[in-house]
């Protein structure tokens, strides 16, 4: 029962949405068409996703709340996380419910622009340093394959750097050729493979052969 | 000995050199000349061909704050071009960070736009591809209020938007999912043209869609933004950051070359002494 009902829901909804791409007719006993019905089901999906955000917040509160109460290692980080989450939620809801209150809107905007934004951008920017160090260590011409990979990476990188273009005007031309010809050929093959794999997996899920999405348990 | 050392340069040395090379041009820009990619020019020509009287553009603000260094200059340059041409611009977000980034873009436009008349930030809709599908099915009624909480029905810009075909061009700025694949799967055949602004690392993945003509144009990372600033003759943060990125690339390539020269040097030396590869 615990598995049969979700599997039935997946089968019915999945088949319904799939059918709406190929057919359109008035559903028996109703005044709505198949496409309209599929559109309503899609709207449910949007609403469920919105609820999932709320559910994630509750989950975050539960896990980190327990960590704070038990004073486990790193509990101070959890406390900062919970505090920040509540500050954003309260200020966000207040400013949204009072659209004429400019001070609240400004506070939310400042939190976003001067706290969240720089922190988030900093985390992402640090990748540049790791990439530089990792490229220096990993890109060695140890074999033909490694040499090809290294040459392509260096040429595309130089093709994208205006300073290299000033040294030799052909760098962007070579970089572009690698991207639009060599890369596209490979990417197209990967895309087709992924599409076929995705179709096969979807079919397995729809027919109940693949049950990984149901999680553990009976 | 030297070859061994050059193969194992301390990562702190690499970090410091890269940091200096990235910061210096931001403090004092060099102004390295920049050529314009054909995919950027395609987007420019598309916007130039629009009619301010009847055409509506949707700007998809689907990039996260983390990737804004790469994509935000593109969005700002495009919004400036649309504002300069008085083209109606509806900003929609399928990523939670989007509406706030849209507000930042609107703030930079100043007196060039009148909110509600030629620009609007409708806000965020959760749901990824499902949300995109919903918007495409009913763009005029998906959002009731804008991001600022004001009713959209009272805004003149929304008057002409009933169907997805009322939108002439979708310009989607993205850092991941939802992105170009979600839009291309859901947009109807013969519907609005679709162009994208993406992070540099995604460029190889997008190329097949560009070559097939499914994408009407493409802005490629920070360079795409900088190129667009050149086209509209308004150099901004994209052009300023491009010097830093350019020098950063040169430093990385230099370190790769040094590492390989040292590798081959030590290999030859090892063979001369009868030893093997010690790397």
Image (cartoon, coloured by chain):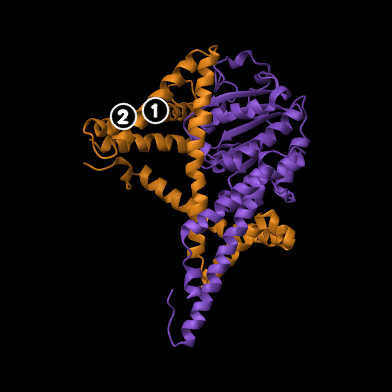
Q: Which mark is residue A133?
A: none
| Residue nearest the observer in this picture, B253 or B40 | B253
**Picture quadrant where residue B56 is located:** top right
Decide if residue B214 is in sight here. Answer: no
The spot of residue B94 in percent (x, y) is 52, 32
The spot of residue B175 in percent (x, y) is 54, 42
Between the residue at mark 2 and the residue at mark 1, the CA separation in whole angstroms equals 9 Å
| Residue nearest the observer in this picture, A150 or B211 | A150
Disc 2 is attached to a residue of which chain?
A
Q: Which mark is residue A85?
A: 1
- The chain letter corresponding to orange is A
Identify the secondary structure beneath mark 1: helix
Give the class, few, some or many, for how many residues have Cα within 10 Å of label 1's Cα (few <14, many ≥20). Answer: some
- Position of A42 relative to A208 (above/below): above
- The chain letter corresponding to purple is B
The spot of residue B95 in percent (x, y) is 51, 33
Picture residue at 51% right of the left edge, 28% below the top: A112
């Amino acid at each position: 029962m615990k598995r049969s009902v979700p599997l039935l829901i997946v089968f019915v909804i999945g088949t319904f949405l799939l059918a709406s791409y190929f057919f359109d007719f008035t559903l028996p006993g109703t005044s709505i068409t198949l496409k309209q019905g599929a559109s309503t089901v899609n709207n449910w999906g949007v609403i469920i996703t919105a609820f999932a955000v709320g559910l994630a917040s509750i989950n975050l509160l539960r896990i980190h709340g327990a960590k704070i109460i038990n004073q486990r290692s790193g509990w101070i980080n959890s406390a900062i996380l919970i505090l920040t989450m509540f500050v954003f939620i309260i200020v966000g809801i207040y400013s949204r419910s009072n659209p004429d209150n400019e001070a609240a809107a400004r506070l939310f905007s400042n939190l976003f622009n001067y706290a969240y934004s720089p922190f988030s951008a900093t985390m992402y920017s640090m990748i540049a340093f790791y990439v530089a160090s990792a490229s220096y260590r990993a890109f060695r011409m140890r074999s033909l394959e490694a040499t090809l990979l290294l040459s392509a990476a260096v040429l595309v990188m130089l093709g994208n750097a205006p300073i290299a273009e000033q040294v030799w005007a052909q760098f962007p031309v070579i970089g572009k050729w690698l991207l639009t010809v060599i890369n596209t050929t490979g990417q197209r093959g990967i895309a087709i493979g992924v599409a076929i794999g995705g179709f096969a997996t979807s079919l397995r899920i729809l027919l109940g052969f693949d049950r990984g999405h149901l999680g553990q348990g009976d | 000995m030297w070859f061994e050392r050059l193969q194992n340069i301390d990562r702190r040395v690499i970090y410091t050199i890269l940091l200096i090379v990235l910061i210096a041009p931001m403090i004092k820009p060099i102004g390295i000349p920049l050529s314009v990619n054909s995919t950027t020019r395609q987007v420019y020509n598309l916007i130039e061909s629009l009619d301010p009287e009847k055409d509506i553009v949707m700007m998809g603000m689907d990039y996260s704050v983390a990737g804004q260094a790469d994509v935000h200059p593109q969005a700002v340059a495009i919004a400036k071009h649309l504002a300069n041409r008085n083209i109606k611009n509806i900003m929609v977000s399928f990523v939670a960070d989007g509406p706030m980034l849209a507000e930042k873009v609107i703030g930079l436009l100043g007196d060039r736009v009148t909110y509600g008349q030629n620009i609007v930030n409708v806000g965020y809709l959760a749901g990824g591809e499902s949300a995109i599908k919903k918007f495409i099915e009913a763009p005029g009624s998906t959002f009731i209020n804008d991001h600022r909480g004001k009713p959209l029905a009272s805004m003149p810009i929304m008057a002409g938007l009933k169907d997805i075909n009322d939108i002439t061009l979708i310009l989607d700025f993205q850092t991941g999912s939802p992105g170009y694949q979600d839009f291309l799967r859901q947009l109807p055949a013969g519907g609005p043209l679709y162009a994208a602004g993406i992070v540099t690392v995604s460029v190889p993945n997008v190329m097949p869609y560009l070559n097939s003509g499914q994408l009407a144009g493409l802005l490629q990372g920070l360079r795409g933004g900088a190129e667009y600033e050149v086209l509209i003759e308004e150099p901004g943060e994209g052009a300023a950051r491009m010097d830093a990125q350019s020098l950063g690339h040169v430093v990385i390539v230099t370190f790769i070359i040094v590492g390989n020269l040292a590798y081959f040097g030590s290999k030859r030396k090892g063979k001369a002494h009868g030893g093997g590869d010690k790397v």
